[in-house]
Amino acid sequence: MLTSSLPESLQWLETPAAPFNASLQTPVNQAENLVKPIKIGNLTLPNNLVLAPMAGVTDGSFRLLCSRLGAGFTVSELASARAITKKSRQTIDMVRFQGQARPYAVQLFGAEPQIMAQAAAVIEELQICDVIDLNMGCPVPKVVKTGAGSALMKTPDLAASIIKAVRQSVSLPVTIKCRIGWSEGSINVLDFVKTVLDAGAQAVTVHARTRQAGYSGTAQWQHLQGIKQLCGSIPFIANGDISSPEHLKALSDLTGCDGYMIGRGCVGKPWLFAQLLGHEFYQQREIQWKIFRHHLIDMLMEHGPAAVPLFRVHLFGYLKSHANAAKLRHALCNERNPEVVLKTGSDFFAA
Ligand SMILES: Cc1cc2nc3c(=O)[nH]c(=O)nc-3n(C[C@H](O)[C@H](O)[C@H](O)COP(=O)(O)O)c2cc1C
């Protein structure tokens, strides 16, 4: 492995627990003016590349890593509003991270306006985030059967009541994330967005799939057309299958969106944010290896011995292009020793 010296903006890679440094968040390539700062309420995001909330994936370490590599905004995993009102330590620890880069949103789910409002107030009081995001897109049966998540797309009046109640209880900006509809036969995103805007949503993110589609098939970007026109000056963030600079251009041309939310495209490839910002350092295997190592070490500091199983989803992402990826997945699926995982990464990135 080469050991070239790192530029100042990447020195954190050699320093576990280094403080956050925002220097990589500025676009180096203003081509087409796609990546730029945007405002949510009075809050200015340094750029419009947003790390998607992903339960079991976007813990504090991954949010920080993506911010260090250029993401302008990150969102917590969905957190139960009810659990937060009960001051559940486990739930609060999931959304509170000591080294958290700002700006940052905590995402709440629930179907009861007063509970959502109370939970938002608890979070605001903790001063751990800059935005309250409301989940209106989760497809998981446990969530939708309570009327929360994507089920709210079938009850727009309830969704509106939730937004109004939360806006009344906090001074932080309140945003929503939804899908294009409940099922392929009931795509109602335009009506739904009108409703949430009237209720006071201060930014709207839309995942271009229905609840019925889950995470399968291709995102249906065509259904994002017309949303920006409804939003006016309120930011509209497009989401679904974004993984290259060409995707930003295509989505911008098609929808006029203000921002881009990235989920699975950056799992095993957190340097995607740097790529979209126009940086080139991420192409070096040695730097990719250092990012891998930094990521695992940060997770060990965040989670202790539980980190290695939690890292697995990222590990398999990093190893996706390995010639023996399937074999390695099989060999590592029960691995708990961080040294073995580090050695696997070191061998892979040195090859
Ligand atoms: C494992 C996983 C967990 C997710 N958890 C959440 C969540 O907690 N809240 C949410 O709003 N969306 C969640 N999503 C949806 C993503 O935020 C995003 O909308 C979706 O993955 C589409 O974007 P992508 O194609 O860039 O991955 C999750 C997605 C995945 C794959």
Image: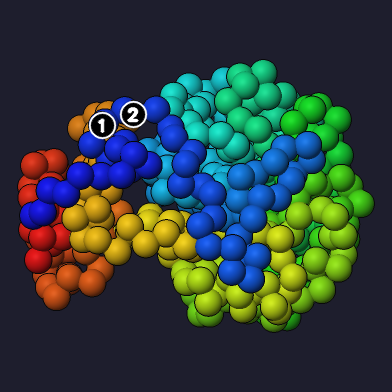
Mark 2 CB within 8 Å of ligand 1: no
Residue 324 image point, x, y percent: 12, 73
Q: Is residue 43 visible?
A: yes
Q: Residues within 10 Å of mark 2 (few under 14, many from 20)?
A: few
Q: Amino acid at mark 2?
A: Ala
Rounded to the nearest angstrom, the CA distance separating label 1 from label 2 is 5 Å
Q: How is the image coloured?
A: rainbow
Q: Position of residue 14 (x, y in %)?
A: 23, 36
Up/down of 136 relative to 96, above or below: below
Rendered-image quadrant of the N terminus: bottom left
**How far from the left and from the top, in percent, is residue 102?**
56, 34
Whether residue 137 is visible, yes or no, is no
On screen, residue 50 above or below 13 = below
Task: Say left or right for 137 vs 164.
Answer: left
Give the residue drawn at x 24%, y 61%. Answer: 284
Please name whichever residue, 44 or 132, is drawn nearer the observer in this view of the structure: 44
Residue 15's mark?
Answer: 1
Q: Secondary structure at mark 2?
A: loop
Residue drawn at x 61%, y 19% is 126
Number of numbered discs: 2
**In the image: residue 50, left or right of residue 151:** left
Q: Which mark is residue 302?
A: none
Q: Quadrant of residue 99?
A: top left
Residue at the spot of label 2: 18
Up the image or down, 218 lies above or below 31; here it is: below
Residue placed most toward the observer, 134 or 32: 32
Label 1, secondary structure: give it: loop
Residue at 50%, 28% in the rendered image: 96
Q: Residue at x 53, y 62 (%)?
A: 29
Tell me, yes or no, whether the two marked residues, 1 and 2, touch with CB atoms within 8 Å: yes
